[in-house]
């Protein structure tokens, strides 16, 4: 997962079709033709609806483009975001990118399947 500071985030980069999806919108109703990136918004760190949207976009819709987490994104949320299919997280202002990256060093693997690796660990290990 790529982690960027809030100052580096571009809402509409030139040459890309970007959808900014509110967290109360139905991702199953989206027209994904030609979409390069979908920004899923976390208005508060306690509001997890964007996790469900990411899962639905990856697993049910088969979206292969970039999923970007925006809004009130904290360090503690990064590992679950990556497991739900997010490619990029835009950190809340004031959060250090180096501190955020260390979260991935703390957790080396998981027993359960997720949106990215659907098989549980016991089914992968041969």
Image (cartoon, rainbow, N blue to C red):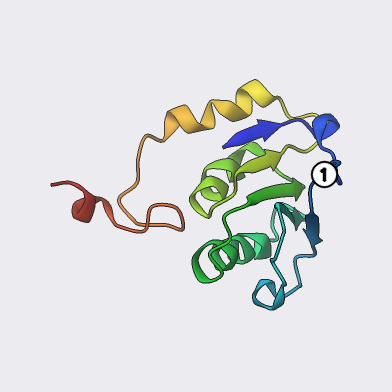
Q: Residue at x 62, y 52 (%)?
A: 65
- Whether 52 is drawn above or below 8: the answer is below
Q: Is residue 48 left or right of residue 13?
A: left
Q: Secondary structure at mark 1?
A: loop
Q: Which residue is mark 1?
A: 15
Q: Quadrant of residue 87?
A: top right
Looking at the image, the residue that sits furthest to the bottom is 29
In this view, the residue in front, 11 or 75, is: 11
In this view, the residue in front, 67 or 103, is: 67
Q: Residue at x 81, y 30 (%)?
A: 8
Q: Is residue 43 visible?
A: no
Q: Is residue 101 left or right of residue 49?
A: left
Q: Quadrant of residue 13?
A: top right
Looking at the image, the residue that sits furthest to the left is 126
Q: Residue at x 28, y 56 (%)?
A: 120
Q: How many marks?
A: 1
Q: Position of residue 117 (x, y in %)?
A: 38, 52
Q: Is residue 34 visible?
A: yes
Q: Position of residue 69 (x, y in %)?
A: 70, 48
Q: Position of residue 6 (x, y in %)?
A: 81, 34
Looking at the image, the residue that sits furthest to the top is 98
- Whether 50 is drawn above or below 92: the answer is below
Query: Which quadrant is the N terminus positioned in?
Result: top right
Disc 1 residue crowd, few under 14, some 14–19, many 20+, Cα 10 Å: few
Q: Position of residue 64 (x, y in %)?
A: 57, 55
Q: Is residue 22 left or right of residue 77?
A: right
- Whether 23 is drawn above or below 89: the answer is below
């Amino acid at each position: 997962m790529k982690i960027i500071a809030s100052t580096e985030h571009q809402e509409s980069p030139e040459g890309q079709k970007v959808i900014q999806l509110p967290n109360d919108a139905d991702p199953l109703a989206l027209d994904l033709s030609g979409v390069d990136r979908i920004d899923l918004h976390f208005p508060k760190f306690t509001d997890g609806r964007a996790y469900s949207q990411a899962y639905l976009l990856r697993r049910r819709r088969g979206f292969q483009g970039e999923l970007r987490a925006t809004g009130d994104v904290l360090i503690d949320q990064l590992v679950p975001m990556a497991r739900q299919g997010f490619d990029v997280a835009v950190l809340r202002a004031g959060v250090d990118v180096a501190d955020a990256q260390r979260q991935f060093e703390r957790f080396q693997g998981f027993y359960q399947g997720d949106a990215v690796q659907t098989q549980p660990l016991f089914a992968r290990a041969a």
